[in-house]
Amino acid sequence: MSVERRVFLGASAATGAAVALGAAAPAEAAKGGGGGREPRRYGFSVLGTTDLHGNAMNWDYFTDKEYDDAQHNDVGLAKISTLVNRLRKEKGRGNTLLIDAGDTIQGTQLSYYYARIDPITARRGPVHPMAKAMNAIGYEAAALGNHEFNYGIEVLRKFEEQCDFPLLGANAVDARSGRPAFRPYVMKRLRTPHGRDVRVAVLGLTNPGIAIWDKVNVQGKLKFPGLEEQAAYWVPKLRSMGADVVLVAAHSGADGSSSWGDQLPYVENAAARVAERVPGIDAILVGHAHVEIPERRVVNAESGREVVLSEPLKWGQRLSVFDFSLVWERGRWSVERVASRVLNSNEVEEDVRITRLLAKEHREVVAYVNQVIGSSVVEMSTAEGTYKDVPMVDLINHVQAETVRGALAGGEYAELPVLSQASPFSRTARFPAGDVTIRDAAGLYTFENTLEARLITGAQLKEYLEYSAKFFVRTAVGAPVDPAALTNADGTPDYNYDVVSGVAYDIDVSKEVGARIVGLSFGGAPVADDARFVLAVNNYRASGGGNFPHVPKSTQVWANSEEIRNTIIAWVREAGTIDPADFAGVDWRLVREGVPVF
């Protein structure tokens, strides 16, 4: 029997216990209207957010001012609340549902503060501000996102306990029993003017990549089967329980891609695939991909019915609105039409009810992030970090390499050269000349990654760098170079471009992918294929994130649980003064036939 089949059977066995809480008892079949009369109709709306990532208010804790970007987007639940209030007033509170598609409790210093600095898990600890705000706004359900697991299961369970709505994850199952570890779905009843309720089932699906990305937190405890596989089990079950409408909140993008190669048998961005292959779904609130999809229609291959997909832009920048039209026929409600759209949160003011509710938490976090931890001799920025070797990324690598060397001192691997891997996570991070604060350091390293040390050979290092170099768009010798168009080839995000310190190399962007690394050397000599190094690497990459070669299967010689961000903060505190002359250099550069691009 396959693992997937055992999971389905386990889920079935759990229906009477874990699942029953989310299900309304099936209503008796209502009698239809008399012949010739106009059929009864009812309309309602489902409002959806996703990838809030700890954004409660329209504030950027990294810049310590109101959020703004090139498109003048706004962020945060306080803005979403105003949009939701407006729609509820327009449509009637009882004719709307509000749900989320995951990634709620990681991403800003607000969410970090209440996971690590003043943790919600402490005895008599605080209520998480995201739970506070979402409870006040009146969410009905939220799917689990992969970043929900970043701080460990204990923090997630405490957040779940503090929410007045269920966290849904039909494909987050107990590793031993295969039973749902979280509620798979919720069934909501909407009262209609016709005396016959509409039963709306919301099925929550999360991302299988959690098994890779948060391996340290979930291994041996939870498993994450594929979205399609679990939807195929649950959707018919929900229909048999009397659901008139089935809506999926999926923390999974729509384009069918995966970032993990052959490490998992499941698709990372599977929402459109679920719509096409699993009959019985009316609409999908899409998350995870951080793209805006006002409306996308996918025809189900079996039923021939259209499934409507919508994904609102991240951080509360947009709100998806699904408008459902139902008709009573043959003794039941049927979906006649679904349409979706997105609303822009920058068109409304913040809901003062939410900003007042979180005023204390906001003040505490602002005070925390503005603590001075050191001083920089010069201003440094990551603005050019995706195509030039810049001191701020060098600082990450310097701190990581120094930390690993100290950890390995006196041991079996103490004599091996230590290299370090880092990505240009943010293009807007900067250290001013003068005082450097916690928010400056947090802006440099925006993820909760921890540090590991892995053994790697010269040949493996070359392949690793070749894989990373696919980040650049191939540009012929003599062709004009636009830095804005040179990077992110094939949609590769900045966090999946690695630079490695401790060796020197050129990246020839005029060459095809796989043949770009030129002159790879260590200490002035070419790197031999059998040379041995220790690579300081973050846990995301070490676990297989980004599908880089060799490192996930390499020997781990050291690891710790301290976040790299905190390691950088501690290093700056101890150093007192940050001088690029102490750690920065040009280890890599872009070239075309040996001629530097910049």
Image (tube, rainbow, N blue to C red):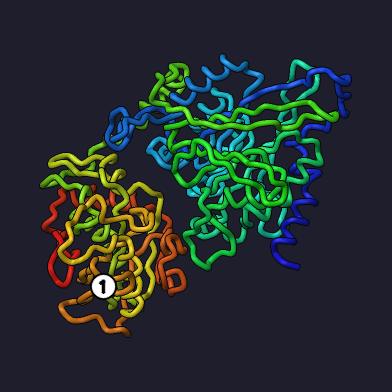
Determine the image quadrant of residue 472.
bottom left
State the residue at coordinates (57%, 40%): 309
Q: Residue 238 in the image: x percent, y percent?
A: 76, 41
Q: Is residue 306 left or right of residue 457?
A: right
Considering depth in this image, is 524 or 316 the residue closer to the camera? 316
Q: Residue 372 in the image: x percent, y percent?
A: 23, 38
- Residue to which mark 1 is pinned: 517
Q: Is residue 222 visible?
A: no
Q: How many marks?
A: 1
Q: Residue 189 in the image: x percent, y percent?
A: 73, 27
Q: Is residue 354 visible?
A: yes
Considering depth in this image, is 509 or 425 the residue closer to the camera? 509
Considering depth in this image, is 362 or 7 the residue closer to the camera? 7
Q: Quadrant of the C terminus?
A: bottom left
Mark 1: secondary structure: strand
Q: Residues within 10 Å of mark 1 (few under 14, many from 20)?
A: many
Considering depth in this image, is 172 or 316 the residue closer to the camera? 316
Q: Quadrant of the N terminus?
A: bottom right
Amino acid residing under circle 1: Ile
Determine the image quadrant of residue 590.
bottom left
State the residue at coordinates (64%, 41%): 306
State the residue at coordinates (45%, 24%): 78
